[in-house]
Image (tube, rainbow, N blue to C red):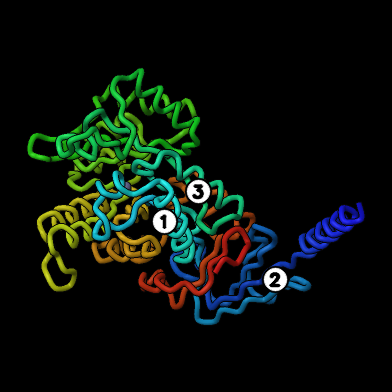
Amino acid sequence: MIQRHARHACALLAFSLLHAAFAAQADTLIIPGAVWDGIAEAPVTGQAVLVRGERIAAVGPVETLQSAGAERIELPRTTLVPGLIEGHSHLLLHPYNETLWDDQVLKEGFGYRVAAAVAHAAATLRAGITTERDLGTEGAGNADVQLKRAIDDGLVPGPRLITVTRAIVATGSYGPQRKSYSFDPGQGAEEATGTEEIARVVRHQVAQGADWIKVYADYRWGPDGEARATFSQTELDALVAAARDAGRPVAAHATTPEGMRRAVLAGVETIEHGDTGTPEVFRLMKKHGVTLCPTVATAEAYATYFDGWVKGKMPPNAELRAKREAFRAALDAGVAICFGGDVGVFPHGENTRELEVMVEWGMSPLAAMRSATSVNARMLHREAQIGRIAPGLLADLVAVPGDPTRDISSLRHPGLVMKGGKRVY
Ligand SMILES: [Zn+2]
């Protein structure tokens, strides 16, 4: 009895201490060298950011932002930028030069894959990525939804996640390829055929926790292994309609002009890759307000892993040249460009390699920074919460040395990462 009493008293004390800690949680005043808000033409010096709870309370000259008892974080010679938003990741995958994709899907146990994903999420947050759209678990069910819950509950560190569970593919079009095995291999995505089955699969994924729906509008299933459109226009229309009824936007993997065209006409909101997109199809994307996640760093990774290409020492191979030309055509057409690297093909935590290649291939560092912040926030329909430094938005903030709107490589070494007002690194 006494023991139970003591325990009760202890719990009470702990509760009141916790309560007091919450009640007295001081504001935080961040004083960087400059602030870049996610949109402006250049960072502004002499600005500070006042954080209260999980949100930004005020932005302005430091002398106007006095708050009694605020904790001051002084970060001279840094630029404070909004937390970065990764548009295309696979937390359940790791680089293919470590383990081929087929072997990850077929031979790695579920528990191992989830444990790795936990480490990947931590590495991602440490790199300054505070929000991430994860575009498919590649055979790991709805582990993304479960990981998101563990992150939101504070059990493990990681970015805010937007999940799709499994991608949806036309029956027989994806991998691992059945012809390569003596057994029927489990697939890296969910197969469907016909409008009725497609609607059922979409609704089941929604029930499993999908925030977005991911579909493969084309894939390398041609007679010679070339990419061809997979779903018919009618099937894609049905998929987008079912997703839209449930309030879920659709992202489409598409590398061919025909796959891209069908996906855009069906009403998807983002196209992933666009490797051989033509000026005509990019103009169609622009007309329909569809965003492109170009995944340029992954194109380089593929050339490195499978074609022996060495960056800086060898000229780009045919695939890279075609990809670069398509990227140029997308820029010329004025298509909104997402920061989405297909990270997982290359290491989690090195996400900003994508931004560096985007700049090498002709985007300005400022435009690339907008892609990683305000543009991706709008793409995700979360512009009222994230992607800018402004009063009322979530205090997702990253401080980097120098000025990333002029030198994108300064994102490699963030000095401070804050997510929802909490300093995480
Ligand atoms: Zn991907």
Q: The C terminus lies in which quarter of the figure?
A: bottom right
Q: Residue type at mark 2: give it.
A: Leu
Tell me, for residue 116, which label it has, or none: 1
* SS for callout 3: helix
Query: For the point 40% across and 52% down, which residue is it?
Result: 112
Gap in angstroms between the C-alphas marked 3 and 2: 37 Å
* SS for callout 2: loop
Q: Residue 138 sits in which quadrant?
A: top left
Q: Is residue 68 left or right of residue 262?
A: right
Q: Which residue is mark 3?
A: 147
Q: Which residue is mark 2?
A: 65
Q: Is residue 229 above or below residue 98?
A: above
Can residue 304 be seen here?
yes
Query: For the point 65% across and 57% down, which residue is it?
Result: 54
If you read the primary sequence from the N terminus, does the residue marked by circle 1 or circle 2 appear first?
2
Q: Position of residue 155 (x, y in %)?
A: 59, 55
